[in-house]
Amino acid sequence: MADLNRPAMRAVAERIQRLSDEHWWALDPSCRLMENHAWVGPTGGRFDAQVQADRRELRAMLTQAVHSANHKLASLQDTP
């Protein structure tokens, strides 16, 4: 992230948190369908494994983005 002052970085961190909150559940409908055996057989099994892995990866990336923004915000000094 560019060198931002504390209020600007706070706005960035809040935006990242909102985006994370909005997209956290994005793959849940697909995962629920797979849990209800929407697709079966070897292809269904592979798709289920992939969508579950994609959900874990998405959540890990969102968590990291929020953590990184909050860490950057915490490291900034208050400016008068």
Image (tube, rainbow, N blue to C red):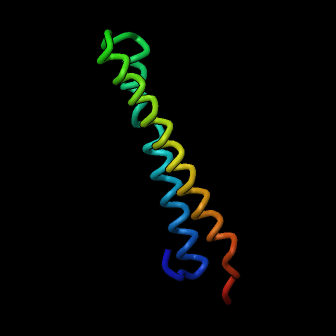
Q: Residue most toward the front?
A: 42
Q: How many marks?
A: 0
Question: Taking 62 as reference, is 49 above or below it?
Answer: above
* The C terminus: image quadrant: bottom right
Q: Residue at x 54, y 45 (%)?
A: 60
Q: Residue at x 69, y 70 (%)?
A: 74
Q: Residue 37: x percent and y percent?
A: 37, 10
Direction from residue 66 to residue 78 in the image, left or right? right
Direction from residue 6 to residue 77 in the image, left or right? right
Q: Residue most toward the bottom?
A: 80
Q: Residue at x 56, y 49 (%)?
A: 63
Q: Quadrant of residue 67?
A: bottom right
Direction from residue 18 to residue 40 in the image, left or right? left
Question: Taking 47 as reference, is 19 above or below it?
Answer: below
Q: Residue at x 29, y 18 (%)?
A: 43
Which of 31 and 76 lies nearest the eye of the viewer?
A: 31
Q: Residue 41: x percent and y percent?
A: 31, 10
Q: Residue 23: x percent and y percent?
A: 43, 43
Which of 18 and 63 lies nearest the eye of the viewer?
A: 63
Q: Residue 72: x percent and y percent?
A: 62, 70
